[in-house]
Image (tube, rainbow, N blue to C red):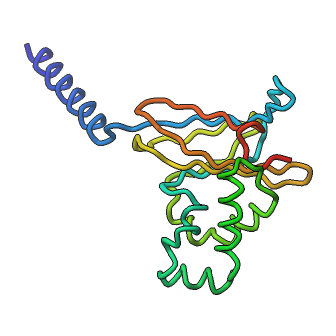
Amino acid sequence: MRNQASFRILALVALAALFELHCSHPNRASLRLKARPGSPPGDSTPLAGVTLHLLDIDPIDLVVTGVEDHTPHGERVYQDHPRLKELANLMNARRQAAYSLGPDVFLFLSQSRPLWEPRVIKSAQTDAEGNARLDGIKPGSYRLIGYIEAPGREAFWDRQVAVDEGDNEVVLESSNALHFK
């Protein structure tokens, strides 16, 4: 009789713990990322060392629209890089017209980093197999930027991604890059 009561109490405690765990992380998602060149077609060689950031805003639009223009750190960024907005407008025009961006995208990323970095939700870097994973994401619409700048290999991705509850996957390859060399 005593063992049954102890078992029931233990079972209730376990159920309460599972319920608490489920409720403390409701509606969470993960994003699996795969970086492959994809060119020539069928090339599945992994791209290791791709830096990935999931943001709540498009970093190019952030600069183009001037969302941070009148904040203390925004004023400082534009003071240090007076042509940053011009560069962002050029990149945005190229992107809107479906032109490939040039290597100046890395200058833009570097100069605008203080503006977009506070908007990063999660970051990762691809492993030797070209894979990365972002866990514990609230479902929603995000901007995924990915880049690699290494000798003989440059690439930049800027994609809107819808993250649904559960497991999601994004493949980054040359065909969906804004800059790939």
- State the image coordinates of residue 34 (x, y, percent, origin top left): 68, 34
Left or right: 21, with 137 as reference point? left
Q: Nearer the viewer, residue 165 or 70?
A: 70
Quarter of the image with the N terminus is top left
Q: Nearer the viewer, residue 4 or 167?
A: 167
Residue situated furthest left in the rendering: 1
Residue situated furthest right in the rendering: 152
Count of numbered marks: 0
Left or right: 158, with 12 as reference point? right
Give the answer, above or below, for where 125 lies relative to 110. above
Left or right: 146, with 76 as reference point? right
Residue situated furthest front in the rendering: 97
Left or right: 33, with 69 as reference point? right
Give the answer, above or below, for where 8 lies relative to 173. above
- State the image coordinates of residue 157 (x, y, percent, origin top left): 69, 47
Residue at 44% across, 36% down: 29
- State the image coordinates of residue 92 (x, y, percent, origin top left): 65, 59
- State the image coordinates of residue 119 (x, y, percent, origin top left): 50, 61
Residue at 75% across, 36% down: 175
Residue at 65% across, 52% down: 96
Residue at 52% across, 31% down: 168
